[in-house]
């Protein structure tokens, strides 16, 4: 049942990405290189919708986000920063994120097959394999134990500081913060005139909430409890590869269903729009760049506990403290990577990044 829920969510978000151009890396690229914030605001709208819906679901007892790793007592600030920077830079090398890779794969992009395999294996090795030893030895010991607060959520922190019940704070934040974000999104006349971007943000935000509801309700089996999660595209590709390799002895879950559904949704939409076409690497240099980027995305995404969707929308929706750290680091790493690709110089990329930091983001 959980795999079916993941498949359904994947079909929706895969079709949305292909049909309405919802792409988290594309949003960063438009903002950095073209000063176009429409897709960035669509991403912000998805965050706002997901946060409001998830917090209300949690208050109702359906989401159980307190059991997710986003709100665990271990606050991995170092992993969020280091992993986010690596993921963001790798994303720039590839030209998309894990989510976008699956969408490209559904459209017939042969380069995406290579990225999918390397990203998935790198992520799985970092979570449960040989590169995980490096993560556990260097990054994990720097984590802060917030067990006294009950978790690493913003509501946990404010509850301890103000002496107010956490559920009340979560409900308040789940209403006020999304309204502020929605106001910022619709301040732009260009965004208000882009129904496709508005629709994409609404659909992705609701899909994230649906993912938490599915794993929170369907996965609440007292004899075989499942992890509470939602949309994320770093470790699930690796788990999908392992599932395909060990089918007879493996169990399909929400993440595997999500990956398969996202590819299928993108494929169906691309076929309907007659956009199916085979694309390959132009040369060995492009292939090397994609291999490096996919490797960094896998290691960095697991270290940061998520990607642009996993931390950037799902994590943000839980009001996790690590989510904005990871998201900010991903944005910084991606911006540096984009400027490096354009200039070909590390020094010029740093200079351009500094100039962007001084510009107002309206």
Image: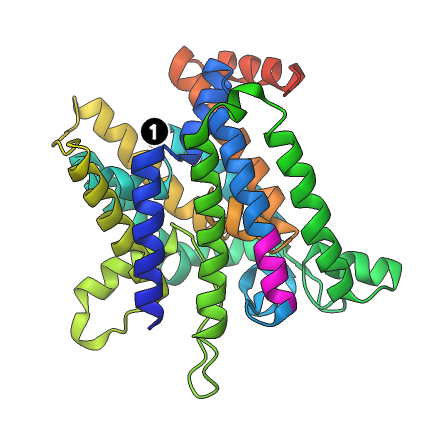
Residue 46 magenta-drawn?
no
What's the magenta bit mostly, secondary-structure-wise? Answer: helix
- SS at mark 1 in the image: loop
| Residue 115 sits in quarter | top left
Give x and y (percent) for residue 345: 44, 13
Residue 55 magenta-drawn?
yes
Give x and y (percent) for residue 15: 30, 43
Category of crowding for the residue at label 1, using alpha-carbon neighbours closer than 10 angstroms: few (below 14), some (14–19), many (at least 20): some
Q: Which residue is found at the position 76% from the left and 69% from the top?
A: 148
Question: As drawn, is 145 to the left or to the right of 326?
Answer: right
Which coloring applies here?
rainbow
| Residue 344 sits in quarter | top left
**Residue closer to the observer: 267 or 325:** 267
In this view, which residue lies farthest toward the right? Answer: 162
Q: Which residue is found at the position 55% from the left and 44% from the top?
A: 47
**Residue closer to the observer: 298 or 41:** 41
| Residue 182 sits in quarter | top right
Give x and y (percent) for residue 294: 32, 39
Give x and y (percent) for residue 77: 63, 49
Question: As drawn, is 50 to the left or to the right of 199?
Answer: right
Q: In this view, does 331 lie above or below 73?
A: above
In the image, the segment drawn in magenta is: 52-59
Residue 346 visible in this rendered orientation of the protein: no
**Residue closer to the observer: 60 or 312:** 60
Quarter of the picture containing the C terminus is: top right
Quarter of the picture containing the N terminus is: bottom left
Q: Which residue is found at the position 15% from the left and 32% from the top?
A: 274
Q: Name the residue under label 1.
A: 95
In this view, which residue lies farthest toward the bottom? Answer: 223
């Amino acid at each position: 049942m959980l795999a079916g829920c993941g498949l359904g969510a994947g079909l929706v978000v895969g079709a949305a990405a292909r049909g309405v151009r919802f792409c988290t890396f594309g949003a960063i690229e438009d903002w950095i290189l073209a000063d176009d914030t429409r897709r960035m605001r669509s991403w912000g709208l998805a965050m706002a919708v997901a946060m409001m819906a998830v917090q209300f679901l949690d208050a109702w007892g359906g989401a159980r986000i307190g059991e997710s790793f986003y709100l665990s007592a271990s606050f991995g600030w170092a992993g969020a920063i280091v992993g986010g920077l690596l993921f963001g830079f790798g994303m720039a090398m590839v030209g998309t994120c894990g989510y976008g890779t699956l969408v490209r794969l559904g459209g017939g992009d042969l380069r995406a097959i290579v990225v999918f395999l390397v990203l998935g294996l790198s992520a799985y090795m970092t979570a449960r394999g040989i590169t995980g030893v490096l993560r556990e030895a260097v990054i994990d010991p720097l984590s802060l134990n917030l067990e006294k607060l009950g978790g690493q959520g913003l509501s946990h922190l404010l509850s301890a500081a103000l002496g107010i019940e956490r559920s009340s704070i979560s409900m308040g934040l789940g209403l006020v913060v999304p309204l502020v974000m929605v106001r910022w999104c619709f301040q732009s006349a260009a965004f208000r005139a882009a129904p496709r971007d508005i629709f994409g943000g609404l659909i992705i935000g609701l899909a994230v909430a649906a993912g938490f509801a599915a794993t929170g309700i369907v996965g609440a089996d007292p004899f075989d409890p499942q992890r509470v999660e939602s949309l994320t595209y770093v470790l699930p590709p690796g788990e999908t590869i392992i599932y395909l390799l060990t089918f007879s002895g493996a169990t399909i879950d929400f993440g595997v269903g999500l990956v398969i559904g996202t590819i299928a949704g993108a494929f169906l939409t691309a076929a309907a729009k007659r956009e199916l076409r085979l694309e390959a690497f132009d040369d060995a240099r492009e292939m090397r760049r994609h291999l490096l980027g996919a490797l960094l995305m896998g290691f960095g995404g697991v270290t940061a506990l998520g990607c642009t969707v996993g931390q950037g929308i799902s994590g943000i929706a839980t009001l996790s403290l690590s989510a904005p750290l990871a998201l900010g680091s991903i944005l910084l790493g991606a911006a540096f990577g984009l400027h490096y690709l354009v200039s070909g110089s590390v020094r010029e990329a740093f200079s351009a990044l500094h100039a962007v930091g001084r510009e107002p983001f309206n």
